[in-house]
Image: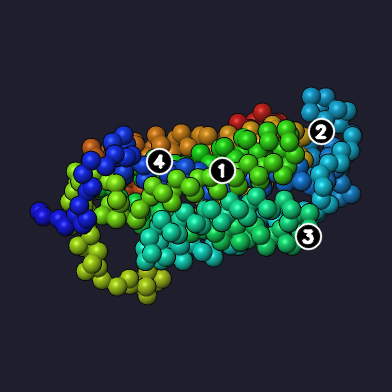
């Protein structure tokens, strides 16, 4: 099969191609980009614990319900001490609105990010999206001091900028990775989502304890801004647009993708009516809505719960909040490999494997959430669950 490889390579030119194949550089920067995108999403969940004035007490409320577990000498003195910390007097409703503001923007640009990434390329959609989100993160502490609603608007804009990252990267993956490598490399790249949660949860508490809550935003926002520099100089939308890729690698990628790219040119229009009236499609939507609710409840509320109910300090809250995502990152990679091995051996069909592994992913967290409601203030059991 003959493939038009575009502009000829420049003889004698030395560069990154001599050390690392261009497609691996794409994978590496995409991995770190997704990791940083999730740190920007998650950091407020931990930082808000230090931002807000909180009253911690083991006393019961007027209606007889317990608002917090009894404090112990190791985490809150005599258990009746009222502690006031933070710069903002936000009630529970305001905190919920502040935490939700990012997701308003994030949801709004998901479809747009995929469309723009396919039309204009991920280089100029994914990269600038994360760069803008990083800049907004750096200035967000200042906006919080100016006005709560100003801070919420900036968080929504940050979410909108971040929302284009994952969808646009799908286009980059389809153009850079041969089919025989795509599952493995895309699995590594998208595992960065869980790693980003781990790093943000774990480091945010430490940063806030060491230098105050604004440091959380300065640190992760600056990393996203710095990441954009190698991205814009090293990433191109496809192998035939890359000026430094070797001819051998370009030929390998384009030859592997030749049939797939030709198939896309004659792809029929999307059957929107059939999709929107399909029972399996709506089943998948409902399923993923449930699993997403679990994930984002943990992301948004766990650090506050650990601090105000179980009385862990902010550094402990961040580290403990990271635990579910450590296991998610590790076991996500393990089960991804296991699923592919089982399907490759013919033990399960693709559909059966999808059902089995997604059932485990849905039922496991649901059971753990239910267990927590029965163990009361047993912090060891709660953390284990």
Depth check, mark 1 against mark 3: the one in front is: 1
Q: Position of residue 46 (x, y in %)?
A: 68, 42
Q: Secondary structure at mark 2?
A: loop
Which label was assigned to residue 223? 1
Above or below for 151 versus 52: below
Whole-angstrom CA distance, mark 3 to mark 4, is: 38 Å
Question: Which is nearer the N-term, disc 2 or disc 1?
Answer: 2
Which quarter of the picture shows residue 104?
A: bottom right
Question: Which is nearer the N-term, disc 4 or disc 2?
Answer: 4
Q: Which residue is mark 3?
A: 147
Q: Nearer the viewer, residue 375 or 309?
A: 309
Asked if residue 238 lies left or right of residue 33, the reply is left
Q: Residue at x 51, y 34 (%)?
A: 327
Which quarter of the picture shows residue 148?
A: bottom right
Depth check, mark 3 against mark 2: the one in front is: 3
Q: Which residue is mark 4?
A: 28
Whole-angstrom CA distance, mark 1 to mark 3, is: 26 Å
Question: Which is nearer the N-term, disc 3 or disc 2?
Answer: 2
Q: Position of residue 108 (x, y in %)?
A: 54, 65
Asked if residue 347 lies left or right of residue 192, the reply is left
**Dot 1 crowding, Cα within 10 Å, few <14, some 14–19, many 20+:** some
């Amino acid at each position: 099969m003959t493939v038009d490889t575009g502009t000829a390579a420049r003889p004698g030119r030395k560069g990154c191609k001599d050390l690392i194949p261009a497609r691996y550089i794409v994978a590496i920067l995409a991995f770190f980009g997704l990791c940083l995108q999730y740190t920007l999403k998650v950091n407020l969940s931990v930082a808000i614990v230090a931002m807000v004035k909180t009253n911690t007490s083991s006393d019961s409320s007027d209606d007889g319900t317990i608002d917090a577990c009894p404090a112990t000498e190791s985490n809150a003195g005599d258990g009746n001490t009222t502690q006031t910390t933070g710069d903002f007097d936000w009630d529970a409703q305001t905190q919920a609105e502040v935490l939700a503001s990012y997701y308003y923007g994030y949801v709004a640009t998901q479809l747009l990010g995929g469309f723009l990434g396919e039309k204009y390329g991920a280089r100029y959609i994914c990269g600038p999206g994360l760069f803008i989100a990083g800049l907004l993160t750096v200035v967000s502490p200042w906006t919080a001091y100016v006005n709560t609603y100003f801070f919420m608007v900036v968080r929504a804009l940050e979410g909108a900028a971040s929302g284009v990252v994952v969808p646009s990267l799908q286009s980059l993956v389809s153009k850079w990775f041969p089919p025989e490598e795509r599952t493995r490399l895309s699995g590594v790249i998208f595992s960065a989502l869980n790693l980003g949660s781990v790093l943000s949860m774990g480091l945010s508490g430490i940063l806030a304890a060491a230098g105050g809550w604004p440091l959380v935003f300065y640190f992760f926002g600056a990393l996203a801004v710095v990441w954009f520099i190698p991205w814009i100089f090293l990433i191109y939308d496809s192998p035939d647009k890359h000026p430094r890729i070797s001819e051998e690698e370009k030929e390998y990628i384009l030859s592997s993708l030749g049939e797939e790219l030709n198939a896309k040119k004659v792809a029929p229009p999307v059957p929107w009516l059939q999709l929107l009236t399909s029972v399996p499609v709506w089943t998948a939507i409902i399923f993923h809505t449930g699993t997403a609710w679990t994930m984002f409840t943990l992301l948004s509320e766990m650090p506050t719960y650990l601090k105000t109910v179980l009385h862990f300090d902010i550094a402990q809250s961040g580290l403990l909040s990271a635990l579910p995502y450590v296991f998610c990152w590790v076991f996500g990679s393990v089960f991804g490999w296991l699923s592919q091995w089982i399907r490759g051996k013919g033990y399960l069909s693709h559909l059966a494997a999808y059902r089995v592994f997604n059932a485990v992913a849905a039922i496991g967290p649901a059971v753990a959430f239910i267990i927590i409601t029965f163990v009361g203030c047993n912090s060891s059991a709660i953390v284990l669950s």
